[in-house]
Amino acid sequence: MNIVLSIENRNAVLSRMAVLLEEQRANLKTINQQDLNNYSGDDLAMEKRLLVDDNKIDGMILSLQQLTSQEDPIGQVRFNFTHDNGLKISNKTAAFGTILIIYESRPDVTVEAGGIAFKSGNKILLKGGKESLLSNQKIVTLWHQALKDSDVDTSWVEYLNYDRTETQAFLEKPTQKVDLIVPRGGENLINFVKKHASCPVIVSGRGNNFVYVNKEADLDQALAIIINGKTSNISVCNALDKVLIDTNLPDWEAFANKLTAKLKEFNVTVLGDEAFARATQVPLIENDLIWYEEFLDYKIVIGTTNSDQEAIEKINKYCGGHSASIITKNEAIAQQFMDNVDTAAVYHNASTRFTDGGQLGLGGELAISTDKLHQRGPIGLQHLVTNKWYIYGDGQIR
């Protein structure tokens, strides 16, 4: 295991990396354009994630600045106890050691996730997708420059330029010690990592998020929240894929038609269950399996329900365990929904697009976990630690 760097060392590297990104802004965009030109796929979400523009670079720099200003997550005391025999016992946060991050297409992850893992005192192994290779390699040269400029060994950040076969071999028999793996990407990537990994994996799961429009909803709010959740960014795991409408809502068909018309203005393909399709003339879903799907596309499925309990049960059956929102003016019903829906984030009268480390006050996230161990939802700086027991004695024996 690496000797943990001092907080001063870690912060110096992060600050320097922010400066280098600003200095290399134009160069990075030019190199990223080569990746975009080389990308021949027709996956719109993948292409959006691949792009590095001024907004993305601003976000990378901001994440590093925020990380630098946050307190050290290592050495935080979680528990203190003095034994009857005089032993002084405490439990403190500690670095994992080496973290492998496997991700698709997003060069900003090379900065943001790498920065969170590094600030948490960990060595970083980065395994990006082939479609973003040139952008990632450029960013890693900046990491190495920032490390050298701060008199820190460049081995703290390493890029693994492996194909699928090499990645599988490394997961099964790592050529160096790996303490934690975080896959960020689609279900195929996550399943591949879970199947082959020989050390703990935090599953950064799929979205497939739901909005439930209760019979006491403010319909203007409902409309705005659904449009925002579906159309503001289709390529992210906190985007909206499913809507349930309470048929006890007065004149729910009129709302259904208004919502459908609005979604079509944004070129969203709308599919419905039997009641919704009959009310709006949208195509009927082929079968219920579509309720399990995450779309990452301009596509949405809207269904109906006649009770809050049925809505909760349907969400718990089909959702990805990520985010769900209820639109209602009834606070008691909202609380019941939030307490019983089994997702990492639950919302009342707000868009699911806020499930994000930066938006939830964490200053960015390594990933958004849909596992329940060891952390659920956005994994921020303070969650990317394990713990360690410190026992101070004076010759005690048991």
Image: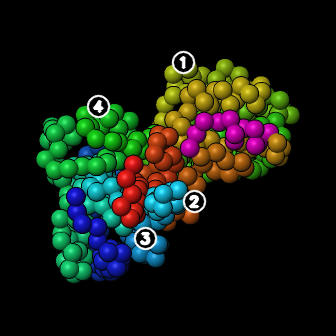
Amino acid tagged 2: Leu
Which mark is first along the chain, 1 or 3? 3
Q: Visible in this render: residue 220?
A: yes
Residue 38 percent across, percent down from the top left: 22, 52
Query: Which of the two discs, 1 and 2, sits closer to the camera?
Result: 2
Residue under label 3, please give it: 72
Using the image as rendered, state which of residue 334 and residue 252 is in the foreground. Answer: 334
Helix, strand or loop at mark 1: loop
Query: Which of the two discs, 1 and 4, sits closer to the camera?
Result: 4
Classify residue 327 as left or right of residue 289. right
- The label shown at residue 287 is 1
Name the residue: 24% across, 80% down: 150
Q: Residues within 10 Å of mark 2 (few under 14, many from 20)?
A: few
Using the image as rendered, state which of residue 270 and residue 59 is in the foreground. Answer: 59
Residue under label 2, please give it: 360
Which mark is first along the chain, 4 or 3? 3
Labels 1 & 4 near each other (Cβ < 8 A): no
Which mark is first along the chain, 4 or 2? 4
Magenta residue span = 333-344
Residue under label 4, please give it: 195
- In space, the residues marked 3 and 1 are separated at their CA atoms by 50 Å
Name the residue: 49% across, 31% down: 293
